[in-house]
Amino acid sequence: MKTEVKVSTKQKRISNILEETGRLIIAGPCSAESQEQVIETAKALAADGRVHYLRAGIWKPRTSPGSFEGVGTIGFKWLNMAKAITGLPVATEVGSERHVYEALKHGVDMLWIGARTVSNPFTIQEIADAIRGVDIPIMVKNPLSPDINLWEGAINRFARAGVSQLGAVHRGFTLSGESILRNNPSWNIPQLLQERMPELPIICDPSHIAGKNHLVSPIAQRAMEMGFNGLMVEVHPNPQQALSDAAQQLTPLSFANMLNRLISEPGYSNPDELLSELRLEIDLIDDELIRAIANRMNLVKHIAEAKKLSNTDVIQPSRWESILQRIGQLASDQGLRPSFVRKLFNSIHKESCAFQQDQILQSAVK
């Protein structure tokens, strides 16, 4: 498929930005919604002076049909107007071969690949083939699941297509059930990616990890503490009126204040925000623990039914001893005291046995 490609040669390469400023900052609304909204945001970000790319979604992959799925190609006109007025290069998400051709035709300066798209190697290969031979920065977000190989594989597909300006964006991983954060940060995954690909710039998208605007700053603080190469943040002039992801977008003023705290002073650290973020992670893990225990007890219910049908005793000493040996070894491998884990699991086992006995008695009464 032939298309006219308009790629700017005046913009600095990502490597030059990192060398000069130490941080790559991408900001802008979740979605391009109107000409006024895009230009107003661009002017505010350009006036701040620390933003390198204006981001805005032209197409939005939504979970449910009927949701706002982006304005489409008309949005490129607004992005180009914003670029002409402010000088900020522009970035947008592409999720298909057609998106790539449309974005290149309209002179977009940077493309990013969203989590849903990265989760599909077939689509990634099609996009990589479409971008082959075009010198444009490509930022690859992590997939929905915490699969380091899937993330690395997507990046390598673009590298093999000849993309010389590659970066990764950590936006967290899908959680099951309600949680204080929108996505699980699982910081060990981007750390592992950095170990595997030490020359790759990795920035953080605290907006998608947080899911709520008041949590964006502590997530960004943690990312800076961990040595990420920058941030991609959703910024909207009127977040309450946003057509997508309203809860997680910052106003330009809030965004500027966050940058002041995080990166204006080299080596600056905000211990209160760092503590807040660490507590968020503890809360997230506690939520997962409760859900895991609830799922375990649901299985115990089925085990009770099976034991009743087979006339098997509730307590099976040999089975339990094998469990303790297995989890004791696992605890040791993970740097935990086996005695602590054994005590914890004995409590869980005691509750499980009591639950089984209750289930069998209730079944007998019926």
Image: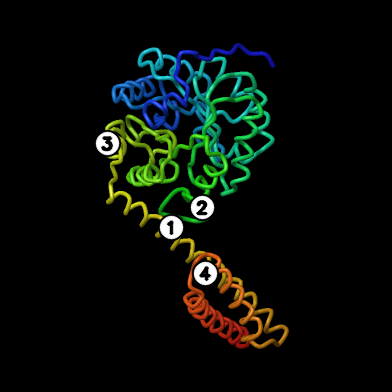
Q: Evaluate if marks 4 and 1 touch, with contact meaning CB atoms under 8 Å apart.
A: no
Q: Is residue 61 above or below residue 109?
A: below
At x 49% / y 51%, what residue is drawn? 186
Distance between mark 4 and mark 3 Cα atoms:
44 Å
- Residue type marked 4: Ile
- Report helix, strand or loop for mark 3: loop
- Residue type marked 2: Leu
Q: Is residue 149 above or below residue 111?
A: below
The residue beneath circle 3 is: 265
Distance between mark 4 and mark 1 Cα atoms:
14 Å
- Report helix, strand or loop for mark 2: loop
Pick whichever of labels 1 and 2 is earlier in the sequence: 2
At x 52% / y 69%, what residue is drawn? 293
User: Label for residue 293?
Assistant: 4
Taking the image as shown, residue 342 lies to the left or right of residue 44, namely right
Name the spot of residue 29 as percent of width and height, x first: 40, 30
- Report helix, strand or loop for mark 4: helix
Of labels 1 and 3, the one closer to you: 3
Name the spot of residue 328 as percent of width and height, x first: 56, 74
At x 28% / y 46%, what residue is drawn? 270
Name the spot of residue 66 as percent of width and height, x first: 54, 36
Taking the image as shown, residue 8 lies to the left or right of residue 269, namely right
Of labels 4 and 3, the one closer to you: 3
Distance between mark 1 and mark 2 Cα atoms:
10 Å
At label 3, counting other C-alpha atoms closer than 10 Å, the crowd grade (few under 14, some 14-19, many 20 or more) is: few
Pick whichever of labels 1 and 3 is earlier in the sequence: 3
- Residue type marked 3: Glu
At label 4, counting other C-alpha atoms closer than 10 Å, the crowd grade (few under 14, some 14-19, many 20 or more) is: few
Distance between mark 1 and mark 3 Cα atoms:
30 Å
